[in-house]
């Protein structure tokens, strides 16, 4: 009998006890005869009793408890390093505010191998009631509204965005294909990808890290895919205040400049620098701070952004 391939699911937790417990409960329903599925929770120094609660309810789940909040990038990097060091063939980065289709992992791995890919994200739908525009959809459409169906990058404005977002899924994005970027909400990578490019660049901390990872992977000859046969649901929780919050405004402004100066076409880089100069001279204080920190490769204290 052939040895089963190992997939480690990595869930990052920071004071998200209820979401994480619900996500882990969802993962108990995963089915696969071909794979050995392991689960690793990386806790970023939570103060909400997450670690004790997870260990009590899911004693077989491995928990790494950090002494400080490492952020999204370094927290997941630590998890991936542990997964591959422990013999995994694949790692699946998974947001804690998700729940999954029972055959998610098996379909992701099978189709990644069939497509000869290295990195992939599945189709991701809004969990019912968590849509951006909740009043727009009939009850029968809830749970079928797309959050991610592949990633695209608007280089003119240096903004990554999700294809299909807010559309009701009726099979319009059901073809496996190369994509500009996978989403950090759910990313499967094989050992080859990890050994070639690692995972996230810690300079980003939050936002743009998945697009950066995808571009580095593609530039190193790795195949980056969207695989719609596998799916999950995202509760789209408003971490750190959500859309329009000081946290989001700061990191999107900061990281867009870092990302754009690395990868954008020359014309877009010039436009981005001109825009950044205007914000430095006349922008609101938080935006000025974000631009200055991008240029100096600094990061604000997270507590000041709440």
Image (cartoon, rainbow, N blue to C red):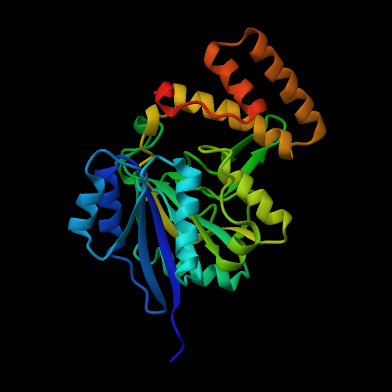
Q: Residue 300, can we see it?
A: yes
Q: Residue at x 46, y 43 (%)?
A: 72
Q: Nearer the viewer, residue 194 or 188?
A: 194
Expressed as whole percent of the image width and height from the top left, the position of residue 28 reads 27, 64
Q: Nearer the viewer, residue 219 or 99?
A: 219
Please tell me in which quadrant of the rendered image residue 218 appears.
bottom right
Q: Can you say whether 275 is above or below 202 in the image?
A: above
Task: Point out residue 229 in the picture as x, y percentages from the top left corner.
Answer: 48, 63
Question: x and y percent of residue 202 in the render?
Answer: 56, 43
Check the image and name the residue furthest to the front.
Answer: 67
Q: Residue furthest right?
A: 266
* Position above or below: 198 against 38: above
| Residue extending farthest top | 282
Question: In which quadrant of the rendered image does the C terminus lie?
Answer: top left
Pinpoint residue 42: horizontal percent, then vertical percent. Answer: 37, 52
- Residue at 43%, 23% in the rendered image: 305
For the N terminus, the image quarter is bottom left
Q: Residue at x 36, y 59 (%)?
A: 40
138 to the left or right of 200: left
Instruction: Please state if 72 lies on the left or on the right of 274 as rendered.
Output: left
Q: Is residue 17 left or right of residue 112?
A: left
Asked if 143 appears above or below 174 in the picture, the reply is above
- In this figure, what is the number of numbered marks? 0
Rendered residue at 44%/42% (across/down) = 70
Residue 267, above or below 73: above
Identify the residue at the far left of this view.
56
Q: Is residue 175 visible?
A: no
């Amino acid at each position: 009998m052939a040895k089963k391939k190992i997939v480690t699911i990595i869930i990052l937790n920071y004071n998200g006890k209820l979401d994480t417990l619900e996500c882990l409960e969802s993962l108990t329903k995963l089915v696969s005869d071909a794979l050995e599925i392991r689960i690793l929770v990386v806790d970023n120094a939570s103060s909400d009793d997450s670690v004790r609660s997870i260990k009590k309810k899911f004693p077989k789940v491995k928990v790494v408890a950090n002494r400080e909040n490492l952020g999204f990038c370094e927290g997941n990097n630590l998890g991936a390093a542990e997964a591959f060091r422990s013999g995994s063939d694949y790692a699946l980065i998974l947001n804690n505010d998700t729940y999954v289709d029972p055959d998610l992992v098996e379909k992701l791995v099978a189709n990644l191998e069939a497509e000869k890919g290295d990195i992939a994200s599945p189709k991701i739908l809004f969990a019912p009631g968590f849509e951006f525009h909740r009043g727009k959809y009939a009850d029968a459409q809830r749970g079928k509204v797309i959050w991610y169906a592949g990633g695209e990058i608007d280089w003119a404005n240096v903004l990554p965005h999700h294809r299909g977002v807010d559309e009701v899924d009726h099979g319009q994005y059901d073809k496996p294909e190369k994509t500009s970027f996978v989403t950090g909400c759910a990313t499967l990578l094989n050992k080859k990808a990890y050994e070639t490019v690692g995972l996230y660049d810690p300079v980003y901390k939050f936002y743009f890290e998945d697009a950066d990872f995808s571009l580095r992977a593609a530039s190193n000859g790795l195949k980056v895919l969207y695989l719609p046969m596998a799916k999950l649901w995202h509760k789209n929780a408003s971490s750190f205040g959500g859309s329009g919050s000081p946290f989001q405004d700061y990191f999107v402004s900061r990281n867009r400049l870092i990302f754009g100066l690395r990868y954008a076409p020359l014309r877009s880089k010039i436009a981005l620098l001109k825009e950044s100069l205007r914000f430095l001279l006349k922008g609101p204080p938080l935006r000025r701070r974000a631009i200055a920190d991008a240029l100096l490769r600094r990061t604000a204290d997270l507590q000041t952004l709440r």
